[in-house]
Image (cartoon, rainbow, N blue to C red):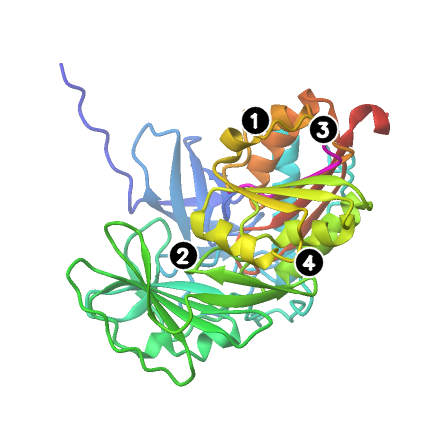
Amino acid sequence: MQAEPRKSLVGEEYEVEVGPVAHGGHCIARTSEGQVLFVRHALPGERVVAQVTEGEEGARFLRADAVRVLDASKDRIDAPCPFAGPGRCGGCDWQHAKPGAQRRLKGEVVAEQLRRLAGLTPEEAGWDGTVMPAEGDKVPAGQVPAWRTRVQYAVTADGRAGLRRHRSHEVEPVDHCMIAAEGVSELGIEKRDWTGMDSVEAIAATGSQDRQVVLTPKPGARLPLVELDRPVSVLRIDERSGQVHRVHGRPFVRERADGRTYRVGNGGFWQVHPKAADTLVTAVMQGLLPRKGDMALDLYCGVGLFAGALADRVGEAGAVLGIESGKRAVEDARHNLADFPRVRIEQGKVEAVLPRTGITEVDLVVLDPPRAGAGRRTVEHLSSLGARRIAYVACDPAALARDLAYFRDGGYRVRTLRVFDLFPMTSHVECVAILEPAEKGA
């Protein structure tokens, strides 16, 4: 006999006391029946009316938005962005919180993930609990730093540029994104007709005047004539194959960090905050303290940011091996580091390529994995190489905490952890953990 479908609770409202912050840009609350609510647009300690946006009777949890605030936190402000709020743009999570409160909430999330997934207190991780803003991002409450150098706009059916609503394919049309960097805003993407496009990505390079627009057309659509107020290169992504084709101008932008220029092609990955690359290189190098003659690994190396910094410091007697899965990123990394004869870049997935290298010992390791983390298999392999120090750069504190637990099983301890707020107004942080053999720190 087929079970009756559960009743949807979408649209139901509950008056709730808001509890602690949770990973993902929401806070935890409970209905009077004890059902868990993940509530966006709320702050810990508030009393709000939460309207369910996802979930059904008997579900493990519900998702909801705080649609009315009955008792506000002292950390609450009016969202500076006119497109923020329940049911609106999903790009920012904390527009309604003071900047200092945002960093405090992010710190609480990192601490909770460390405790729950790695069994570590902040003190055991060598972290004082602070989340450091990027240089220039200390702005008064009610102001928003314009930091995002890469913005991907979705396009409405009538050709307007906008941003996705939270956990939705629906588009919130915008006439200006407050967190977009000046170089993105000056392209005027929001003011043009993009009929036929599925998405439009705007890129404003850091350290050069390069600007790029990456278009993803709907099947069968013709590309618009892109005439902007300043020189800009245009790329097109084939919807079916995912291949990137040059339409106009250079197929790459030039980024700059640690005193070097890096070519980044076909809309490839580069840190989106203008200070992020330098901030992270400094944190990694201060933690690793490379020596002349060291052998180092740079895993998930992208276009070679950390490999270049390592090569510069280990000198001609040292060597660096980078591993990266993306074909174009590998081409760029080899180009960017061509002046270092002792740098080698291999293409492929880290878990497949690393065992094939035959490397049994290294001095230093940098890994900057995707959001899902490195995983047990890769961590076990790295733990067997006897590195003096390992730098783990993480964009997701949950994945970092899981991998730190694997490293502990492999004989490594966390020496220091630094947490950076390189994504203001969002729930995201960037972490740099420095690890060393446990017996050294015993």
**Callout in the foreground (3, 2):** 3
Question: Which residue has dot 1 on it?
Answer: 355
**Callout in the foreground (2, 4):** 4
Would residue 131 be seen by someone viewing this image from the given angle?
no
Q: Residues within 10 Å of mark 2 (few under 14, many from 20)?
A: some
Question: Which residue has dot 2 on it?
Answer: 90
Question: Which residue has dot 3 on it?
Answer: 361
Asked if the residue under mark 4 is in contact with the one under mark 1, i.e. CB atoms within 8 Å, the reply is no
Asked if the residue under mark 4 is in contact with the one under mark 2, i.e. CB atoms within 8 Å, the reply is no
**Callout in the foreground (3, 4):** 3
130, above or below 145, in the image: above
The kind of residue tagged 4 is Thr
Q: Secondary structure at mark 3?
A: loop
The kind of residue tagged 2 is Gly
Is residue 274 in the magenta section? no
Marks 2 and 1, how far apart at CA: 41 Å
* Horizontal and vertical percent position of residue 337: 61, 55
